[in-house]
Amino acid sequence: MTTAVQEPAPRARRLGAPELVAAVLDAGTFESWDRPVDTSHLAPDYRGQLAAASERSGLDEAVLTGRGEVGGRPVAVVVNDFRFLAGSIGAATAVRIVAAVRRATDEGLPLLASTSSGGTRMQEGTPAFVGMVDITRAVMAHRAAGLPYLAYLRHPTTGGVLASWGSLAHVTVAEPGALVGFLGPKVYEALNGRAFPPGVQTAENLAAHGIIDAVATADELRGLVDLALGVLLDAPRPPRLPRRTAADGVASPVPAWESIERTRAAGRPGVRDLLRHAAEGTVRLRGTEQGEHDGSILIALTRLDGQPCVLVGQDRARQTPSSPMGPGALREARRAMRLAEELRLPLVTVIDTPGAELSQAAEEGSIAGEIARCIATMTTMTVPTVSLLMGQGCGGGALALLPADVVVAAEHAWLSPLPPEGASVIVHGTPERADELAEQQRVRAADLLADGIVHAVVPEPADGPESTDDALVRALAAECAHHLDHLTTGHGGAVVSHAAQRGFPAAW
């Protein structure tokens, strides 16, 4: 089996550390944290190399650290410069990085790191090599404090840098056309006598495989960081969209089969419409970070009607018989859950699926185990969670994203252990009685509300001038934001103890 590779995009001009800092931070806000490096104990020839690198780059080491602001928000920065001995990490470099990361943690600052390095400094050997462990330890302590860590991988990023702090960010973006890989291609060719396959170690290929989140130029990076920090740092705003909830159900529920047919209609809005019409400041994430990406699910940092959250949604438009929602999609969902928990942001899940993949590949990829792990993660989260049953809610793939503090449903949404046709085959031996069985199984949103499975039902616009995609998704977003607001803050604005908010029905 051959693997298609992505050809790299043309690279923009390569920026040194000072130029990148100037491009991303607000003008005049950078404050260096760097202290002079003592090289007196080093061998004379190595000191000469360091002096030449300093003269060439204008820096005293391969990394620049400090703090500044992006959009008026404080941020700590650690930026490699390839001009200084190929951005390599020596003992003094590692000490500088560790000090900066620890200071960012102590001061409660988000961290933006940008790599451009060949890895460990060969002139210093193993002592420098193990410095990657100290950097990793500092980064993980920063994350454990609930502080954001963003990374921008520049050309080239290889070796121990990629295998440590370059691969540990909450959000990872890379420079177009950047060489990003574990073993540098020149070293690979020298060791193996053949060239490394072209196009594999590129930013674009890593994004296609769900290892990094996006590819962006240095000019685009500032906007991405600004959006991400807006979600991660800015306080929630009071919801503004008008609510249209039916706390006691809908006046005249339609037959279950009519609702099912409505949710299966090609033009019904989905999670992308929700983000398009009712969210702002959205930063899309991609993949599991472990080499998997399933387009049937979507992850984003966003503000839903003013409420910052991590959103994970099933994209029904991308789920087809030839590309069903597989176990990789649920592993992506669990990445979103971990992000929300670690960043201490609310989680919003959007359910809209005709069912998880049924195949040999899905079984061997642990589809049942991934459903179980999603449910287990959802039921043990300590941040506020809201689940939106937006359309189809079929089988374990729907259940995986359901058990939130508050479950909101669109009027015609439904939840069933199997596709109604399949359930009819089991019970009656024929799919022809699917409509009858759906009614008996109480799959409708109105029934789910009456049974305590959902907490609020949002009426859908009747057919007519007001029946638009944005009208429905705005109403759904308003209801979700209302519950996020109440879950996150008390009447005095203090954060509510989340454990006390859980009020699942006995079925949970």
Image (cartoon, grey):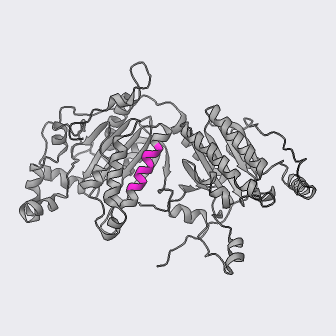
Magenta stretch prevailing secondary structure? helix
The front one of 429 and 41 is 41
The front one of 227 and 359 is 359
Q: Which residues are magenta?
A: 330-339
Specify whether 9 is left or right of 487: right
Location of residue 135 with respect to 46 vertically, above or below: above
Residue 392: image x %, image y %?
Answer: 25, 52
Specify whether 392 is left or right of 423: right
Q: Look at 51% across and 38% down and name the residue there.
A: 231
Q: Is residue 241 visible?
A: no
Q: Is residue 414 visible?
A: yes
Residue 440: image x %, image y %?
Answer: 9, 49
Q: Look at 75% across and 43% down and name the residue there.
A: 96
Judge whether residue 487 is colored magenta.
no
Quarter of the image holding residue 185?
bottom right
The front one of 456 and 243 is 456
Q: Quadrant of the C terminus?
A: top left
Residue 347: image x %, image y %?
Answer: 40, 41
